[in-house]
Amino acid sequence: MLKCTIDGREVEFQSGQNLIEVAKKAGIEIPYFCYHPGLSIVAQCRMCTVEIEKNPKLQTACSTPASDGMVVSTKSEKAKKNQRSVMEFLLVNHPLDCPICDKAGECDLQDNSFKFGDAYMRTSEDRRTFMDLDMGPVIKKNMNRCIHCTRCIRFGAEVAGIREMVAIQRGNNTEITTIDGRPLETEYAGNYSDICPTGSLTLKDFRFKKRAWFLKKTATVCEGCSRGCNMEIQQEGGQIYRCIPRENQEINQWWMCDEGRFNYRYTMDKSRITEPKVGTPGALAQTDWGSAIQAARKAIQGKKTLLLLGSDLTQEEAILLQKFAKQTLANADVRHFGTPGVKTVADDAAADRLLKRKSKTSNLHGVEKLGISAFESIPAGTEAILVVRGGRAVLPSFGGVASVVGVGVFADSEAKALSTVLPGAAFTEKDGTIVNFQGQEQKLKRSVLPAGKSKALSEILALWTHQGAGLSSQTGSKSSAATLSEGAV
Amino acid sequence: MNNQNKEFKMGPQMETGNFGGSQGGETLYIQHFRNEEARFLPYYMEKMQGYTALKKAFGMTQAAIVDEMKKSNLRGRGGAGFPTGIKWGFINDKTPFPRYLVCNADESEPGTFKDRDIMRYTPHLLIEGMVIGGFAVSANVGYIYIRGEYTREAKLLQEAIDEAYDKGYLGKNILGSGFDFDLTVHRGAGAYICGEETGLLNSLEGKRGEPRVKPPFPAQAGAFGKPTIVNNVETLANVPFIVNRGGDWFSKLGRLERSGGTRLLSISGHVKKPGVYEIPAGGMTIRQIIYDLCGGVLNDRKLKAVIPGGSSAPVLTADEIDVIYDIEPLMKVNTMLGSAALMVVSEDYCVVKLIHRITKFYAHESCGQCTPCREGCHWMESIIERILHGKGREQDLALLTDISDNIAGKTLCALGDAAAGPVASFVKKFKPDFEAYIRGGKHA
């Protein structure tokens, strides 16, 4: 086993690992800015320099692979002086506008300055300033805060596959910008903000909305496509402020696309129906849950029913619905729907070079595993449709069937063909399991409570069967109750 | 041709010196400089044993050529003084193909202009040296990365290359040896940093001229990610002499144990006869160079300072010039030979203004990728500028010393050292001059 010594501690490592990673494993922090495990190594910021025995010069830990018997000091006087000096250099031109900067509280520059820098500054010269250009709808650039780590340039070129961020001018005047000042084109622009070690690239969506330290974080999974990127929902007081990716080497590494990042918006949107509604298609009126459930039951009762199940639902919800169909809906036909053009897993493929998949629903692979087949067309003689979806599955045409009960998340505009809407929980509001295209089972975690009067699917179905006890001709209340406690999530 | 020649004539101030000091010794270049015919192939063939070394090299094994280079004690003439034979030896049987040979003709160190004369007057020496070098390391493609401002030299080089192609000294199956070598002149765009070898390679590839992280060194992954040898113009021009007359002979041209050959000096500043000179490596002290070779300080003023190796070398005072002008003796007095560009400063010139100009240069030429150089060089420039404008503070001198210490040895490439060394040495050695500005608000 290969071993080296860092700060007096013997650390095992694998050949090829750099000193930052080896030290991290041993719980020793080597500060850095330009290094990112997912990007090429440029050794530019010079923050990670360490002293290595028998080496007269300080070496950058990011570009130095550990070797057997190497003796490294990250806290020697020489190393510490350089950390102080790099911090000082970086702050010579940094505006120190932390009080109005969105990055404050989660800023590498701020943290490292606190831990490794000096409390006093020796500069009295004017700071350099830049005019900022607009970089499109996702990212706000503030060049004055930039520390030239070039992570964004490398992310664009190496990960997103687009050379749009570049350095222009040189020396003290070096500016990080887009080619010809064009807006960003990549569909992964949000990552620029994630990897920026300071407040130079921030999300326009998040800007000036919330201080980072107030945010409560929930580790969950994106429902944007069949990849299931690991992400974190950050909310306060039931209001979601942003989503950021979590590292998962097998699925999304460190990244996520903008579509997934901002997908949560529909769950907070004003047009989302969060009150039960009944009526006729196009003319729905708000009501209470009791009347709505009765109306829904009436719409379905005794009719030849088709149950359409969105492939954006969790495994638990799908199993529950399968049982519900069997026991309460007289073996109604159950079909799944989701992305137009991607009917089955055979149609699902990579949609770009990085993360995106063609299936825009998260659990296509899961619902197929449950033996549910894809919706093709409405069978002849269908009198009623019960359509259940999470929020992303694209509603098919209901072919003139008048009794359509919708359960789940619908926007006003989507509810036009529905006669009853029972508002359900969105992916941010429920726990559950989804299966991605690799067959990986992942957990959705509830981050916020269901919006308005929305209810979890299990609760809605429980209401349905309990209120229906005695009315139902097909199923006894006993077995329904048993079903629900089994499938409840 | 004659019309073209006229524009290359130098003014009377720019004497090309000739070595004639008491040390004696053979010169290789200087007798051909300022001769407008020297750059053409007939002169080269007749007077300079043109392309005979190449014929001889084709009869030698590659290892034997590298051995001769090692024996010659030729130290790189670009500034770092790395032994050329050892550099070539980095390429061995296991090195993958293709391999490249790149000539660094960027000559961007302020004060240096010796390579320009080689390209003006003896371009075929360089071409022959490169073909031999290419043969020795099995590189079939060579590039000459020439400083953007050297427009005329680029043209002259291209003319010489065309001549060599015509006569079969370049191209396919050179002299029937079966060895192919193509040579391309690539013009830089005017950045100092492209004289740094990895910055040069990036620029050659069409990328931003920024130095790369080392390792990997160019011999492992250089131009286009392939093994590459990068040598200075003068270094490569020495190769035909070494092959023709042997490494031992070349080594003995030098007067020091580990420094062979002759050296071309670029001498500028306040001397009576500035210009390019040739001396045996390690054959003279700085005092001899200034007073014997160049006729003394201009207007017989007192000597104030000497910058011995291009503007990046730490400065020497008038009391420190009895030092042999070569790599190791200068290292012992904490400065460097660099590109052998000696800049002489008389008492008439203000050293604070001088260091301001030097620092401004490095701040301007910093590529901007690594922190200490990008931020530190400009910071030092601002402080010195403030001192010059009478707004200096007592603590500025300690601050300058500390900033330069924080830059030196901590940057990605040597530009940081180049900027830090002069500042630290000027502040240390000419403190009263700075203090005069700080206290009195003007020049002492």
Image (spheres, rainbow, N blue to C red):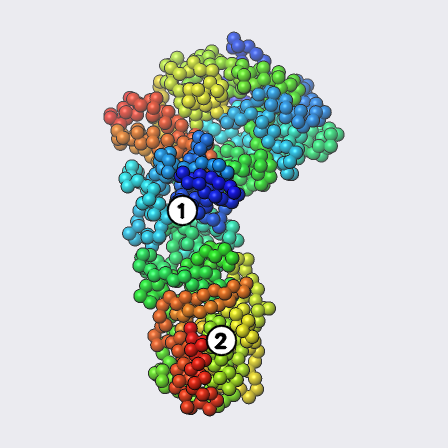
Quarter location, residue A189: bottom left
Q: Are marks 1 and 2 on the same chain?
A: yes
Name the spot of residue B158 as percent of width and height, x first.
62, 32
Secondary structure of the residue carrying tag 1 is loop
Quarter location, residue B54: top right
Name the spot of residue B287 as percent of width and height, x first.
44, 13
Residue at x-position 33% and y-position 56%: A212
Question: Which of these two is toward me, A13 or B415?
Answer: A13
Subunit of label 2: A
Question: Which of these two is toward me, A84 or A51?
Answer: A51
Residues packed near mark 1 inside 10 Å, few (<14), some (14 to 19) or many (20 plus): few
**How many numbered dots are placed on residues in this image?**
2
Q: Earlier in the sequence, mark 1 or mark 2?
A: 1
Q: Residue furthest left?
A: B439
Subunit of label 1: A
Residue B126 higher or lower than B193, as above or below = above
Side of B158 where A50 appears, left or right: left
Q: Three-letter amino acid code at disc 2?
A: Ile
The reply to whether residue A281 is in sight is no
- The residue that disc 2 covers is A319
Residue B32 higher or lower than A458, as above or below = above
- Say the numbered circle drawn on residue B196: none
Secondary structure of the residue carrying tag 2 is helix
Question: Which of these two is toward me, A315 or B187?
Answer: A315
Q: Residue furthest top?
A: B22
Residue at x-position 45% and y-position 63%: A221
Name the spot of residue A196 as percent of width and height, x first.
41, 50
Question: Which of these two is toward me, A50 or A179?
Answer: A50
- The residue that disc 1 covers is A27
Side of A169 where B55 appears, left or right: right
Q: Three-letter amino acid code at disc 1?
A: Gly
Name the spot of residue A202 as percent of width and height, x first.
38, 55
